[in-house]
Image (cartoon, rainbow, N blue to C red):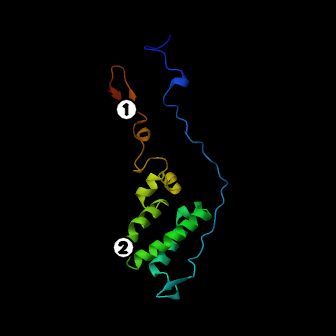
Amino acid sequence: MGGNGPAPKSNDRRARRNKDAIPQTVLRWERAEAPELPDFRVERDGQLVEFVWPERTHEWWQMWIASPQADHFGSSDWQFLLDTALIHARLWRGDLSAAGELRLRVAAFGATPADRARLRMVFAEADGLDGGRGSSGAPSAREQYGQLRMMPGGKRAEPGKGE
């Protein structure tokens, strides 16, 4: 027996088809090793001088190399992050105008919990640590109440206990 109401629209008349408007491009994945912060020269007062990375930028770079996200970085990711390191160095040298651009760039790599949530990143180790009981670690509802059964008349009875 059919349901109530009008017949559904045919697929070619539906406004929403849940298909991607632009097809996805699948790329071959190649993990890349992190480069070291390079030595180079910059022009200062008409002279070429050796660029000195702030110590804080060295620490920041090592943090990215050790991050879980780094396992998923390709060569273009590391190049973008290397350019971002220059912005980080500017900020730590006192150029506060670099802060906004730095924030935008590191957000693309999942720097903060909010960034990782937006990028749908999760830490795999956390999935198995709770034994499948959910985030609180408390027993599941099935573990707590799985033995309860309904009695005729709608009253609950615990196994092994009379009324």
Q: Earlier in the sequence, mark 1 or mark 2?
A: 2
The three-letter code of the residue at mark 2 reads Leu
Contact, CB < 8 Å: mark 1 with mark 2?
no
Residue appearing at x 48%, y 29% in the figure: 15
Q: Nearer the viewer, mark 1 or mark 2?
A: 2
Instruction: Give the vertical position of 49 relative to 97 (above or below).
Output: below
- Note whether residue 111 is visible: no
Marks 1/2: CA distance? 66 Å
How crowded pointer 1 is (Cα within 10 Å; few <14, some 14-19, many 20+) is rated as: few
Residue appearing at x 50%, y 26% in the figure: 14
**Residue 104 in picture, x, y percent from top left:** 43, 62
Q: Secondary structure at mark 1?
A: loop
The three-letter code of the residue at mark 1 reads Glu
Query: According to the image, label 2 marks what residue?
Result: 96
**Residue 159 in picture, x, y percent from top left:** 40, 32
- Note whether residue 128 is visible: yes
Query: According to the image, label 1 marks what residue?
Result: 158
User: The C terminus appears in which quarter of the rendering?
Assistant: top left
Q: How many marks?
A: 2
